[in-house]
Amino acid sequence: MFDKITVNGAEFQIDPQTNFWGIGDSAKLEQLYSQMHKKLTAEMHELRHSTDLILFYVNPTDMCNANCPYCYLPKEVKSRGKNMTYQELRAIVEKAAKFFKNQNKKGSVIFHGTEPLLNKENLFQIIEEYSKDLFFGLQTNGLALTEEDAQFIKKYQVNIGISLDSPIEEINDFLRGEGHYKQIMKALEWFRGYRGLNVVTTITTYNVGQLKDMVRLLQSKDVTLCLMNPVRGTQKSAHPLRPDPEVAAAAFIGATEEAIRLTKEGKRIVVADFANILLGVIAPSARVMMCDISPCGGGRRYFAVAANGNAYPCGEFIGMEDFVGGNIFKDSVETIAASNNFLKVTKRTVDDIPECQACTFRNMCGSPCPAEMYSVDPKMLQKSYYCEFYKQLAMHALKVIARGDVEHVVKKPALTELYNLQAP
């Protein structure tokens, strides 16, 4: 019934379909599983197949003030030079607010890129006007960020993700542009102590050996949340920058271990990507990030809007016209979400990938990313380039569980709520 994996002397018994797991007597585990199977199956089905949209990604401009060598957006998109007007942005946000209100929830709009702060005047006006109706987020390379902008962002409690690729100035600026490192060091001071901040590092062949040092640097700036994402090969020009999966796994695990060590010392910092994988083991339905499950969140939990209004399952698909689900200025949210082009992504599951069907970790990984897959296989039905990377991370999550370090990755209040236990 269960796959068996031994980690740190503990034998984990895991059901790959529901992610149910246990350590100990097989007969007792099977009895417990039989009691919980129906509920667990329903929860996993809901997690994987719910079409409850909670988030819109909006690219308010096609323009960028950087030229990162691994950018997932094609040059023809970035060269269009389109900046959304205030009226266009207002129309999108108004449509989002009405949609979420009809769903009896307060949804989110994240301004993404290219570089959204090249349209900051219109963005900030929209945030000011609609902050009571929607949660807002902003993903930026930080080059156009000012201290005044930081004050505005904190005032309206906007979640902000800032890119930083290396703790070494020369390497970071090679990847992100001259002067980027110094600018981000200033920005981290402006946001010191702000809990709406996260720092995003894209893992490439250039910085893969520096992830542990990156954790140390960020923690010294009081950053409590960071993401470390391996570069996607959505554009073939990015393929040479993809690190060897096993090398990337070792470096990533080293970074998570450093984060756990610092957290134990009272200097809390979490690598969010790993926390999400850990949640995939201990509480699958509590996962927030939707890349490491299939179908992924693209098109069913969120979708992305390009500066011309075209809607795609996620930002990685922008520029791939085979995946346009409609235009936000002309079509309803419901029509876009139900479009045949979105169904190509929302119906793509790891269960249909031969190499993944027997994998213990298939519902902790999901063989991401479908957009990256599409660049080499229109059917998107092959195992991820980063297959071994995700396997190693899942194994490490089991190690963290076995040695009792979960609370140093997932906060105690969250664990208390998940398990309905009394906090120690």
Image (cartoon, rainbow, N blue to C red):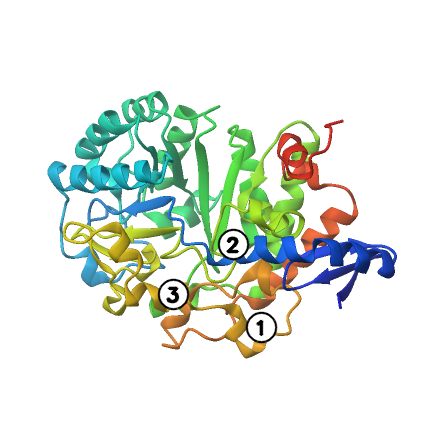
Name the residue that disc number 3 marks: 345
Q: Which mark is residue 356?
A: 1
Q: Which mark is residue 46?
A: 2
Circle 3 sits in a helix, a strand or a loop, which is it? helix
In this view, 297 is above or below 359: above
Q: Which mark is residue 261?
A: none
In this view, 101 is above or below 233: above
Q: Residues within 10 Å of mark 2 (few under 14, many from 20)?
A: few
Q: Position of residue 395 (x, y in %)?
A: 69, 58
| Picture quadrant of residue 104 | top left
Point out the image quarter for the C terminus: top right
Q: What residue type is disc 3 on?
A: Val
Circle 1 sits in a helix, a strand or a loop, which is it? helix
Task: Judge depth for marks 1 and 2 and give the one in front.
Answer: 2
Circles 2, 3 touching at the beta carbon (< 8 Å): no
Which label's residue is closer to the chain start, 3 or 1? 3
Foreground: 211 or 380? 380
| Picture quadrant of residue 267 | top right
Which label's residue is closer to the chain start, 1 or 2? 2
Q: What residue type is disc 1 on?
A: Cys
Q: What is the C-alpha distance between the residues marked 2 and 3?
A: 17 Å
Foreground: 133 or 279? 133
Circles 3, 1 touching at the beta carbon (< 8 Å): no
Point out the image quarter for the N terminus: bottom right
Q: Position of residue 399 (x, y in %)?
A: 74, 52
Which label's residue is closer to the chain start, 2 or 3? 2
Q: What is the C-alpha distance between the residues marked 1 and 2?
A: 21 Å
Task: Judge depth for marks 3 and 1 and give the one in front.
Answer: 3
| Picture quadrant of residue 348 | bottom left
Q: What is the C-alpha distance between the residues marked 3 and 1?
A: 17 Å
Q: What residue type is disc 2 on?
A: Glu
